Image (tube, coloured by chain):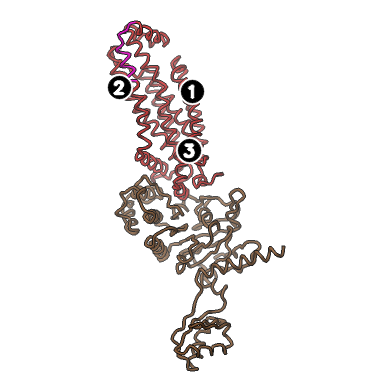
Chain colours: A red, B brown
Amino acid sequence: MIWAAVITCAGAVAAIVFAISTLLMGSSEPGKRSRAWTIARTDLSQLRKSKDFWIPMGILAAMFFVILPTVLLFSLTHIHNIEIARKLGQVVGTIPKELRRTVAHASPATQASYSAAVYLFAPIAIIIPLTVSAAVGANTIIGERERGSGEFLAHSPATEREIYTGKLIASLIPGYFTALVGFTTYSLLVNLLVGPGVGHWFFPTPNWWILMLWVVPPFIALAVALILVISARVSSAAAAQQASSLITLPLIILAYGISSGSLFKTRLLAAVIGGAAWIIAILVLTRATRSVTRERMLGLGSGG
Amino acid sequence: MQPVESPSVSENLVLPAVEPDAGKPAGAAPPAVELRGIRRSFGKTVALADLSVTVPAGTVTVLLGPNGAGKTTAVRVITGALRPERGTVRVLGLDPLADGTEIRRRCGVVPARPALYERLTGWDNLHYAADLFDVPEAETTDRIEEASTRFGIRDALMKKVGGYSTGMRARLALARAVLHDPDLLLLDEPTAGLDPESARAVLNLIDEMAANGRTVVMCTHLLLEAEGLADQVVVMDRGAALVHGTPEELTDRFWPTTTVVLDAENRDSLDQVRQFDYVQAYSRNGTAIVELDASARVPELVDALVARGVRLTRVEPRRPSLEELYFEVRGRQERERSTSGDAS
């Protein structure tokens, strides 16, 4: 059952990613290096060399994917006060029966730590990658303009669609990478800290697979597409950061609600929400290609 | 070859135009750039107002004009980075609106700001350009080494561009612009703020490109650097070409008389030139400056003076500099404007 869900989700993601990349990168001439990928690779290379960007982001991710969960889960699994453990165990009563059975035999401390591992940190899986991608995306086009390098791209053979796609890929990859590394690390951590109490390695649960493979990717893509539209239109990086906050904040709240609530009611609902997010993301991604114009790369606002 | 229309001049200005293709044989190569009636504005600011310029293939054309004359906008229209609101553009025989990618692939642009990626090394910057401009992968390394050696930055290639001096950045931008061996090189104020060595590298590049049959368009407001380079000069102001032609054509047009500097063992003997009817003006303050009605009169003048026993020590026909030409054009424009202003 679990593996069927994983394979289905992974297959769907792969198919959609392939469809998007074909759609957006289709203008590259056959047999030649993709200019979109060249632009993305160069942006990522610059990002890799920007310690002032990735060190704070790394600390943020480590804080939420590693440090806080470690402290909390370690504390929960080592509670000796039966009263506190019982109160925390009541939380487990709110989760679906199917999952409750997994820890029915375990101690109240284990039940509490299981609940925290599976539900408390679920929103982090969306918020942190979204924050990383939003920070990269907000600066990517306006940054070219502010540095003057937009003029180089505007005079290059790269089409506007290739420039947009390159910037999109360069903004998505850090978010997806953060999600992948964070998710993997968090999974190991949970299994090492809570697994012994449960009796076996249990994480990721099926719902987490759905969250990570079906719900998180479109949310990040949607946010980045909207932020790229802003980054192409505003006149400064500071304005782009401000405006991107306006976009990411509602998405974060929405993601929080989905990941911590409705997603876990039924898997069908989660699948529907993820599907809707994919459709909206693809529509916005496609329409956002128009936001990148040579005139805007040159810093000429109208861009039309 | 299609006859080239006379360039538009601003409505109130009536300056004679020179056909850049005049006198060239039929069947010559089509022009590298043809701009006809180009208009482009930004809000209420008109950057280009009916600009018409033809750049013959394999020549060096210098766009002269003050800041805000529309030179940068013209370069952007040529590569298709900006769409004109009106007018037609042909570059290397192609339309930038339909074949922009192909045109830009065959153009090298050195913008007024070097537009480099400061966090990357010089090598990374050049490699990025090579990939974007379709340099074959097998040739990329050789091309980068060749271009960096040519502009004297090879030793700094592995350093981050953020640590480069202004001159090194300019040289890197030049190397990047020629990496893909462009047919058309567009340089926008390429020597502004450069040290003499880097400025010389720019001028040498233009010479080399021209010698290899490439077309070069250079925007500048520094008249001295254009001196001796230009096959064609276009004087621009307020988004229009006031006048264009070869330096010789423009000189003949604006200074129909020929000036000769004379000196002799006995300077008083030079005063005899006043007697010749083809001498338009004469002055002597140490050396003598003689204005003749045509350049062909110079040998005649020398013969006549020698026949009269004048022992000449210096005969130097003097062509006006580009700077003089520029200010003459601008001066006439201002006079035309003030005249039309008075009339209205």
Residue B283: where, in percent of width, then height? 54, 82
The answer to whether A74 is drawn above or below residue B255 in the figure is above
Confirm whether circles 2 and 1 share one chain: yes
Mark 3: give few (<14), some (14-19) or many (20+) Cα within 10 Å: few
Q: Amino acid at mark 2?
A: Leu
The answer to whether A92 is drawn above or below residue A33 in the figure is above
> In this image, A74 relative to B199: left or right?
left
Residue B182: where, in percent of width, then height? 42, 57
Indicate the secondary structure of the residue bearing disc 2: helix
Q: Earlier in the sequence, mark 2 or mark 1?
A: 2
Q: Cα distance, mark 1 to mark 3?
A: 25 Å
Membership of B85 in magenta stretch: no
**What's the magenta region?**
A69-82
Indicate the secondary structure of the residue bearing disc 1: helix
Q: Amino acid at mark 3?
A: Ala
The residue under label 2 is A188
Depth check: A303 or A62 in front? A62
